[in-house]
Image (cartoon, rainbow, N blue to C red):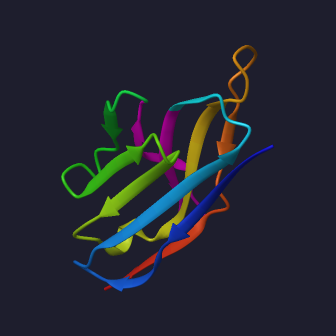
Amino acid sequence: QVQLVQSGGGLVQTGDSLGLSCAASGSIFSINVMGWYRQAPGNQRELVAAITSDGSTNYADSVKGRFTISRDNAKNTVYLQMNSLKPEDTAVYYCSADIKPTIRGPIPRYWGQGTQVTVSS
């Protein structure tokens, strides 16, 4: 069984910084893409940032230059550093990981439990 456990998040003011982390554990052969998504009330879940196993990154236009995604492959952990936060960044943030549990077979996407990030104006 694979589990993603998130930490971080909370209430901050406009312009502040905040970091999120997400650690994968369990039956893991390899991890492909890891990412962060967010969902604000009334909105669909959207991709914030993603990172491949070799470190290539992709960001939503709304967070480019402010957010940084990184990962520690030895720890099966992905991070999201959020700087210059804005009220529109307020949402529940979810981490994701495409994890291969065995040498063969499918590569399902797993999700973290979600964490609230609230940016006050």
If the image is split into quadrants, where does the C terminus sit?
A: bottom left
Specify start and end residues of the magenta stretch as a single range: 33-52
Residue 100: image quadrant is top right
Front in this rendered view, residue 75 or 97: 75
* Residue 106, x across and y down, in percent: 73, 19
Front in this rendered view, residue 54 or 37: 54
> Looking at the picture, does residue 43 appear above or below residue 56?
below
Residue sitting at 72 percent across and 29 percent down?
Answer: 101
Q: Main secondary structure of the magenta part?
A: strand
Toward the top, the furthest residue is 104
Residue 118: image quadrant is bottom left
Toward the front, the furthest residue is 74
Task: Examine the rendering and report whether any part of residue 41 can be seen.
Answer: no
Tally the numbered discs: 0
> Looking at the picture, does residue 31 appear above or below residue 3?
above
Residue 115: image quadrant is bottom right
Toward the right, the furthest residue is 1
Task: Examine the rendering and report whether any part of residue 11 can be seen.
Answer: yes
> Looking at the picture, does residue 85 appear above or below residue 112?
below
Residue sitting at 54 percent across and 69 percent down?
Answer: 7
Q: In the shown orientation, is residue 111 left or right of residue 10? A: right
> Looking at the picture, does residue 59 appear above or below residue 106?
below
Q: Is residue 40 magenta?
A: yes
If the image is split into quadrants, where does the N terminus sit?
A: top right
* Residue 108, x across and y down, in percent: 70, 30
Residue sitting at 63 percent across and 60 percent down?
Answer: 5
Residue sitting at 38 percent across and 57 percent down?
Answer: 80
Q: In the shown orientation, is residue 40 left or right of residue 11? A: right
* Residue 23, x across and y down, in percent: 56, 54
Q: Is residue 46 magenta?
A: yes
* Residue 43, x across and y down, in percent: 56, 57
